[in-house]
Image (spheres, grey):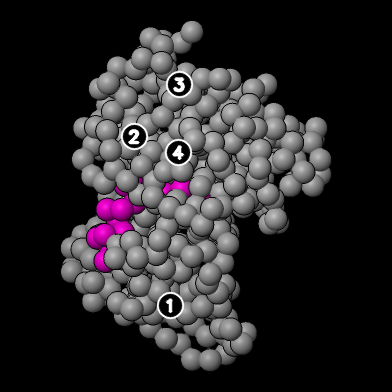
Amino acid sequence: MLGKQNTQVAIIGAGPSGSIAAALLNKHNIDCIVLEKSTFPRFSIGESLLPACMGFIKEAGLLEAVLAADFQFKNGAAFHKNGRSSHFDFTDKYTEGAGTTFQVQRGKFDKVLADAAQKQGVKIRYRHELLSLDLSNKPLLTVADENQQQYQIEADYILDASGFARALPRLLDLEEPSTLPPRKAIFTHIEDNISDQHFDRNKILISVHPDDSEVWYWLIPFSNGNCSFGVVAKESFFEHYPDDNIQALKQLAMEEIRLAIILREAQFPNPSGEILGYSANVKQLCSDKFALLGNAGEFLDPVFSSGVTIAMKSAQLASHLLVEKFAGKEVNWQQQYAQELMVGVDAFRCYVEGWYNGQFQEVVLQENPNAKIKQMICSILAGYAWDKNNPFVTQPQRRLQTVFELCKP
């Protein structure tokens, strides 16, 4: 084994939460090492950002690089179910902050963030993988480098930004079953060839299957004429479709009347991907030695594109607390990190559950909504799920039930 190294913060993963956290810490001259087991660019799902992300990107000093990358402009979300349609303009929302963002190919987007962080001085070690972890004293990480040579890093604190790899939950036995039922997503990138004049490329389109309201589609346009196209359902639903995911996607697209029109000339030249049982939870989000960021801690569901927003929010919260910690201030990680992060996570969770039980579908598809209520809901959909002045954040279940009772058929 090679020698032992020292750093203030070890960050596992160079995705959005890892790059944001590292850039924020670097601004305060806090030494950190980012360990990334893959090389960039690499494929990842979660391609439709929310406007709230822009504030985190700007604070980390990475906005200029993102703006220069020519990603697809995004200003809202559109919904369609059995001939009913609605849309939300993210600039017409209750909470202050950015009202527009981008739809991104994550391989390119994650590399843009990581490269920009490196230019600021952040140290990222690609193809370095965390093998084991000892928390008995100071956190001690055993790492394998790109040549499979092992070495150790002693850190004052660890941020797990490993996403679906969930490095620390796996090593520390922190994983816990999700409160959400297991679902499966199948997806691909298509050459969309969309000529329909009513289709808005500046919005993600969420469509509901005509025969099963728990089955939904995403269509995320990119600036290069392609789209990310996917379907989410319980695993048993897909038993009635071809084993070949591309053929299943083609068949499913033709079953939804709006998508059948939009994608009538689409080509499917790329391989498919799938994720099964993606929702995740943990026994604890943090301690005085580590914090789990984004998907490493909890992942809900892709329906409202909340994953990257939660990841970036967790990076911001943890970084701010580490700045206080290294300045000699007392930090209560459970109260200041876990409880604060869960304000937004729980708000998103309420609307995810409401989507699948049908209540939130009725709310977002309401024909003549109250303007003020729509603005409050729009803030959640735009990612501002930590705005405690918004009643739909602080009392999500009560507010959703009330609005549903008013608008249900």
409 vs 372, left or right, is right
The stretch of residues the image draws in magenta is 46-61
Q: Does the CB distance between marks 2 and 1 fall below 8 Å? A: no
Q: Judging from the image, what secondary structure is the residue with disc 2 in?
A: strand
Which amino acid, mark 4? Asp
Identify the disc placed on residue 124. 1
Instruction: Answer with mark 3 or mark 1, whichever residue precedes in sequence.
Output: 1
Q: Does the rendering let one see residue 48?
A: yes
Q: Judging from the image, what secondary structure is the residue with disc 1 in?
A: strand
Q: Residues within 10 Å of mark 1 (few under 14, many from 20)?
A: many
Q: Residues under labels 4 and 2: Cα distance? A: 12 Å
Q: Mark 4 = which residue?
A: 200
Identify the disc placed on residue 365. 3
Q: Mark 2 = which residue?
A: 89
214 is higher (above) or lower (below) than 295: above
Instruction: Answer with mark 2 or mark 1, whichever residue precedes in sequence.
Output: 2
Instruction: Answer with mark 4 or mark 2, whichever residue precedes in sequence.
Output: 2
123 is higher (above) or lower (below) than 343: below
Which is closer to the viewer, label 2 or label 1? 2
78 is higher (above) or lower (below) than 127: above
Which amino acid, mark 2? Asp
x and y percent of residue 284 in the render? 45, 50
